[in-house]
Image: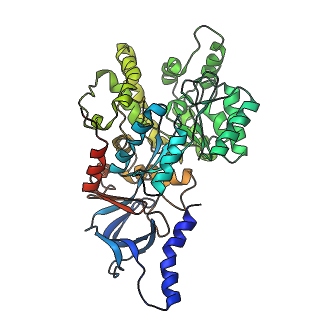
Amino acid sequence: MKLLPRLLAATLPLLAAGCAGRPTQPAYDLVITHANVVDVETGRVLADRTLVISAGLIHQISLPGAQPPAAKRTLDAQGKYLIPGLWDMHVHFRGGDSLAAANRNLLPLYLAHGITTVRDAGGDLTPAIFEWRKQIRAGKLAGPTIYTSGPKIDGPKAFWAGSLEVENQAQIDKALDSLQRLKVDYVKLYESTISREVFLSTITAAEKRGMLTTGHMPYTATLREASARGLDASEHLYYVFKGCSAKEDSITQAVQRSLGTARPLGLFAVLPAIYRTYDAATAARLYQTLAKNKTAVVPTLYIQKLLAELPTTDHSRDTLLAYIDPRIQATYARRLAGARAQSAATRAFNQQLSAKFMTLVPALQQAGVTLLAGSDAGASNSYVYPGTSLLGELELLVQAGLIPAQALQAATINGARFLNADQLSGTIQAGKEADLVLLNRNPLQDIRHLRHINTVVAGGRVYGAAELRQMLQAVKYSR
């Protein structure tokens, strides 16, 4: 809906000039010359292009040798590499009203690392998020475009504050009604207490309304069932991994039978059994099902690796800790305490699990499953810093076996397509939003070159290196 006003704004100067009969050039906002444009869809570099930007949109892209038009600002890329702004497809803004300002101060960290769009995966700050989004669109707040699920849907006495708790169809309908009134971008389900039947019924009900659904899946259900119901994406790899077990059905039944006992089986209790019964042929069949049903996967390798290493890693000297409000740092304590209390055997298994998860990624890609790059940055997720954690995620995707172009797709066009925004975003094309990152080096050669940022353009607004440093300095906390 925001595309039409911007297109009109971009074309009005031309119309006005034509009506007046004057051959004057339109007052474009920005022209970028001599840019090597990275085509993330084909993995090719389009050399020496000129981009003309007006009203936050790319008006045209000219071939080498074209005379650049007049503009309010001209940026000579000097042969540097221009990519679409990155998408972090799994972040969290949460912690209640007392942490609203602290969460808002995380926004510049995303821009400083080339992330111009984020997908908030549920929390308890929905009104604040909608306000930030309005301010960002109006140019009053520096930050990425935000897509949000609003509150999660879960069962009674849900783990996360602000969740919509459902136990029957009437409550499912009421929850979805409220999310539609909020005009959320998708529905996020969580598994802390939701039953198998209600989880699957929520997917069915949301799909009938045309609402995208993603989620954590209760281990009383299978990903095959959820995918068949229309689940659009599975967050993390725990649920995919369960579906790779040759004994998935019997493990699922054991979890179901345990619910009425004093010691119900949860995800972490059955992971060792899943690990032991992993079967490549079963995994291949699952991947084919996910690809056929267009169920995407968000691997979140970075947080998996970080948490596996948390018991033995000292993060107290992390440079980016200086940009995290002490009140958000305080939310790290629960995970940190749990990590330190782990047995040696648990620590060893978590390391093995992280390594195993890495092997799933290239197989999912090869099977045609859509991969979405997400960091899981946010309060309560210890030391998963906004911005740099997504770059770490992309590096791990390549380490796992993807080529850099595939990793870039997971953080650009795949996210835009998933959220039905690919006509507006995700690639560098005329008519699309001017969300761009200028890199000093070619990321198709080495994904680590994403860390060498020269300039970020978000909604047509230019943030040079000095401006990005000033933005970060403004939200830095004393150590």
Residue at horizontal 40 percent and vertical 47 percent from the top: 402
Q: Position of residue 374 (x, y in %)?
A: 45, 42
- Decide which of 418, 283 is in the foreground and name it: 418
The residue positioned farthest toward the bottom in the image shown: 21
Left or right: 291 as drawn, with respect to 413: right
- Decide which of 182, 259 is in the foreground and name it: 182
Left or right: 225 as drawn, with respect to 30: right
Q: Position of residue 472 (x, y in %)?
A: 29, 46
Q: Which quadrant is the C terminus positioned in?
A: top left
- Decide which of 350, 169 is in the foreground and name it: 169
Res. 355 in view: no
Res. 463 in view: yes
Residue at horizontal 55 percent and vertical 38 percent from the top: 234
Q: Is residue 291 above or below residue 58?
A: above
Left or right: 473 as drawn, with respect to 381: left
- Decide which of 454, 82 is in the foreground and name it: 454
Q: Which quadrant is the N terminus positioned in?
A: bottom right
Residue at horizontal 25 percent and vertical 37 percent from the top: 319
Q: Position of residue 214 (x, y in %)?
A: 58, 39
Q: Is residue 9 above or below residue 89?
A: below
